[in-house]
Amino acid sequence: MSNTSTAAHHAASNNRKWAIGFTIAVLTVFIINQFILPSAPKQVVEFFNAWFSLTSMAEIMVWILMALGLNVIVGYAGLLDLGYVAFWALGGYVAGWLMSPFLSQFQINFFGNPRPGLEMGIHFSFFFVLILGGVFTAIWGIIIGGPTLRLKSDYLALVTLGFGEIIPQFMVNGGDVAGLNLTNGAQGIGGLDDIKFLGYTIGTFSLPEKFLMISMLAGAMIFFSIRLRDGRLGRAWLAIREDELAASMMGVPLWRTKFASYAIGAVGGGIGGVAFATLVGGVYADRFNFVISIIILSMVVLGGMGNVWGVVVGATVLAWVNSVGLVQFGVVINNALGTKINFPSYQFLLFGLLLVLMMLFRREGFIPEARIRMVMNEEKLEDEEKITDETKIASH
Amino acid sequence: MTSVASGVARKKVKLSAILMKISMLFIIGVAVYWLGLNLFKDPIQFASVTVNGLTNGMLYALIALGYTLVYGIIELINFAHGDLFMLGSVFSFAILTEALGATEPSTKNYVLLLLVLLLTMLFCAILNVTIERLAYRRLRNAPRLAPLITAVGMSFVLQWVGLKWVGSVPVNVPTVLPSTSFGFGGVEFSFKAVAIFAVTIPLLIVLTFIVNKTRRGRAMRATAQDKDASRLMGIDVNKTISFTFAIAGAAAGAAGIMYAQTIGTVAYNLGFQLGLIAFTSAVLGGVGNLYGAVIGGIIIGLIQSYNDGLPIGPGQRWSQTMVFAILILLMVYRPGGLLGETAQEKV
């Protein structure tokens, strides 16, 4: 343990490198779109819009937010959540309820920015809604996690799977709950307020500013993820992930720690949901399906469970492939070979095979954390099996 | 609770236990009141809804058996199992309806139906064994998260196969079974329901016989309890696990063809919904318990049918929500299921 301080120092400088890289990447995208593209030749603009459109870049940032939230649950604490899309939906609807004319029974304006003539409904400030969205999803994380986390961790996977299916269904059905219109059904809630930031309004079509705003949220999420992992709670999560029995023997309260991971992970989904709703200017129930939960999970697995920067890279690559890459590669290949293959329909195969192959051949992900590489490739110890069996007999 | 707990803590535990009991009784009371209200309002509809629920429940039971068998032996929630069922229904549609052209009731087609039933069971069994051989077996000693994620990935791959096979929209299946029904005291029994009973009940009996009475079944139960000890006793553990996957696959295949023939549609995303319902059934009965899966399937079938069909009720659009609510309530009140022992983790 003599080289702990050098290791910590190494990790810190490593983090700094990545952080600088992330900032430069974000600023490059912003500058290209804000200053260079408007005066660039037509062909260049077309190329950028096809391969690196700003909408897809902003969506990548939302995916990073989501993936980092899920990383707290899957990567840090080792709990499998298969319905993360539910938190996305919940966060989105918080924005829909609190930033639009939709709930027209009320007329509340709290530092909000309602469009002229649409003052009915609830209008909260974007930043206030971010906080409320986080709190709301955390409460739902508590409701789902509370009863389930006492059981075997497999049950959490199942319950979250159901949860991810039910919440969007509720949103679709919620147009008429005992006569009350809670969610506007399948139509969704549109016409969200513009973000007002220090007196400056980011309009519906000012994408570069929106991109910068969401990137800053993603950056904050990265910062908190790293700080959380290195803190007391983070170390407790990693201990549980690696060996529950040993962790509880060392005095880590299992239930409370898992619970914290689930609630905090949910917050990421809520914030991402609010950000995405303001990005597209509305929230639509049919967008939220199981595929999204699996894509987010693939992002965490591809980059390396538990490693923040790995997850960021995984999210960037997969989000880009999913939104632009698959379509564009399809166009290129179909043009070159004269074929008519529908590339986006291979989405299921791509993400399914990715998960299976990663688990079979590279469980620690492509940018693994040193510790998880060790744990994921360790065969189960014979002693450990024996101990669990003995405790089973003893507790009967 | 440990004996070290102080007096104050003990009081708290007792209070929460009482609260649990009271709230559970309250929920059961509401359910009984709801059913009673409907029974008095329209007894005949109540009875036909019950028949409907029983037939659905039988199908759920067949799928739930697969979950429970696999969970029992390698403690894996096989997320791909629902999609295996879906591929079974698609396979039966491709063979029976498209290749053999059996689209209407006739004696010849009944024979074909039985043949394709066997073929579908074989197909799903082979597919399930292949998946186990290629993916899950390599991960048997890996951390718990790895096989779970692999199962989810497999489920996606199977869904993709289904998507390429039947397309993205549900396809109507012209069924071989007659759509006539016979009345019995005002309650309609359709021949389709009879067919489901005629296929599922013998299958369930055969399956439980295999697990409980044969040599292979004994090997399965031994492997489920302790792999190392069974290996020492001369049991081929790998072969036994493959055999379990084969049985589970065959049950899913049978459920698949019966679903296609009675409900009359196949779709690529069928497996996801039914898989969730079936696993809830398995948990309700007590995961790892064969009879539990059957009873759980029937109960879920009934509840869903009551929810969808009774005059006073939430209606079909809340169907999935209802099943999920049951799952959550089970986690709170009886995680071990109706027939299982407590599933509290012992670590």
Image: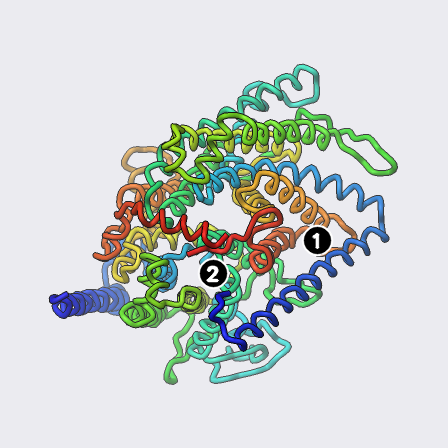
- Residue A116 can be seen in this image: yes
Could you tell me which quadrant the C terminus of chain B lies in?
bottom left
Q: Which residue is mark 1?
A: B315
How crowded pointer 2 is (Cα within 10 Å; few <14, some 14-19, many 20+) is rated as: many
**Are labels 2 and 1 on one chain?**
no
- Residue A287 can be seen in this image: no
Q: Which residue is mark 2?
A: A149
Residue at 45% from the left image edge and 49% from the top image edge: A393
The chain ID associated with circle 2 is A
How crowded pointer 1 is (Cα within 10 Å; few <14, some 14-19, many 20+) is rated as: some
Classify B46 as above or below A4: above
Q: Which is more toward the observer, A43 or A331?
A: A331
Q: Which mark is residue A319?
A: none
Camera-near label (2 vs 1) is 2
Residue at 76% from the left image edge and 44% from the top image edge: B49
> Residue B309 location in percent, x, y?
74, 48
In the image, B294: left or right of A277?
A: right
In the image, B276: left or right of A17?
A: right
Residue at 58% from the left image edge and 38% from the top image edge: B290
> Dots 2 and 1: beta carbons under 8 Å?
no
Q: Callout 2, which amino acid?
A: Leu
> Residue A80 location in percent, x, y?
41, 54
Q: Which is more toward the observer, B45 or B213?
A: B213
